[in-house]
């Protein structure tokens, strides 16, 4: 079995596992609706439409991705299922990457759900069809999945190599560290424009950060070892 087939095998398994967990699905729907609708209502329909989609898609991807990554990575360590998985012919890197993609795909789908809710509510309240700008469409189609993948890969790496006690806080620290890249208002403060409307510059900055973060975690994944993972389980 080649590497990509191993990755696809693990990805399918994790997607099915996530989609069959009603608690996770409910949490995903709740987060998607909450961030999308709340950001929109607080910002104002007409003035904040594109800014809301920019923020909501990233927030939903990261927060839902955090829940899903804990399920596909941390749950298996806690229940010691990962020990059995490590004894299979699957390579450790294919297991890690498959789990990352298995959590990313459904998290991204919930980001799209959030976009849909924002568009529907905005159009109804404004009595006209509102559509995202071209830059926001690129953001949704390209930047959001990369950003979400990068966040989940970093959290997943931490959940693999750190002990159970450390994992109680590492996810929160990563999420908090990513928050500044999710809000146009923060970009506005940095650039000296408090009324900033998302443009190619902000989307470009976000995409560069996501690519760098993904490259970093991909590089760090070279140092994953089965012995280290088993040791972290036994030490708790």
Image (cartoon, rainbow, N blue to C red):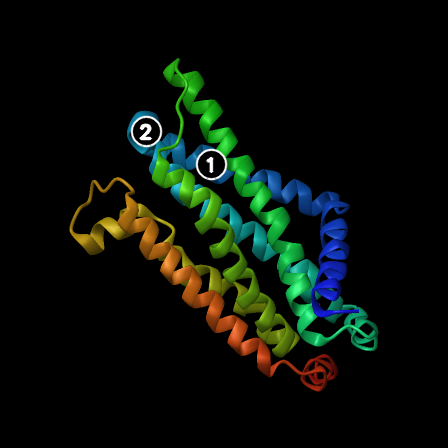
- Place residue 133 in its image quadrant: top left
Question: Residue at the spot x=54%, y=72% of the render?
Answer: 218
Question: Residue at the spot x=21%, y=56% of the render?
Answer: 190
**Residue 79 placement, left or right of 216:** right
Numbered disc total: 2
Q: Nearer the viewer, residue 164 or 50?
A: 50
**Does 212 appear above or below 117?**
below
| Among numbered discs 2 and 1, the one appearing first in the sequence | 1
Residue 169 pos. (x, y %): 54, 68
Quarter occupied by the C terminus: bottom right
**Residue 12 placement, left or right of 161:** right
Question: Residue at the spot x=66%, y=69% of the render?
Answer: 96
Q: CA distance from mark 2 to mark 1?
A: 12 Å
Quarter occupied by the N terminus: bottom right
In the picture of the structure, the residue carrying the numbered disc 1 is 36
> Residue 215 bears which disc, if any?
none
**Residue 154 placement, left or right of 22:** left
**Does 81 appear above or below 39?**
below
In the picture of the structure, the residue carrying the numbered disc 2 is 44
Q: Nearer the viewer, residue 123 or 30?
A: 123
Q: Residues within 10 Å of mark 1 (few under 14, many from 20)?
A: many
Q: Is disc 1 placed on a helix, strand or loop?
A: helix
Residue 94 pos. (x, y %): 69, 69
Residue 205 pos. (x, y %): 32, 56
- Place residue 110 in its image quadrant: top right
**Does 36 appear above or below 62?**
above
Q: Is disc 2 placed on a helix, strand or loop?
A: loop
Residue 132 pos. (x, y %): 39, 32
Q: Residue furthest left?
A: 192
Q: Nearer the viewer, residue 196 or 149?
A: 149
């Amino acid at each position: 079995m080649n590497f990509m087939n191993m990755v696809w095998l693990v990805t399918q398994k994790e997607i099915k596992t996530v989609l069959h967990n009603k608690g996770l699905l409910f949490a995903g729907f709740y987060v998607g609706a909450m961030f999308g609708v709340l950001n929109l209502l607080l910002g104002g329909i007409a003035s904040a439409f594109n800014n809301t989609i920019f923020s909501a898609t990233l927030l939903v991807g990261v927060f839902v991705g955090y829940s899903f990554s804990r399920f596909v990575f941390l749950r298996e360590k806690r229940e010691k299922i990962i020990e059995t998985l490590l004894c299979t012919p699957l390579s450790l890197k294919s297991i890690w990457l498959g789990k990352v993609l298995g959590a990313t795909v459904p998290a991204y789908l919930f980001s799209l759900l959030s976009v849909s809710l924002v568009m529907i509510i905005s159009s109804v309240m404004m009595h006209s069809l509102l559509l995202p700008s071209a830059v926001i469409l690129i953001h949704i189609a390209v930047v959001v999945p990369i950003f979400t993948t990068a966040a989940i890969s970093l959290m997943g790496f931490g959940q693999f190599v750190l002990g159970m006690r450390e994992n109680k806080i590492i996810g929160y620290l990563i999420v908090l560290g990513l928050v500044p890249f999710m809000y146009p208002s923060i970009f506005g403060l940095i650039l000296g424009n408090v009324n900033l409307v998302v443009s190619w510059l902000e989307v470009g900055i976000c995409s560069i950060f996501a690519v760098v973060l993904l490259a970093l975690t991909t590089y760090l994944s070279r140092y994953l070892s089965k012995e280290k993972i088993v040791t972290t389980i036994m030490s708790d």
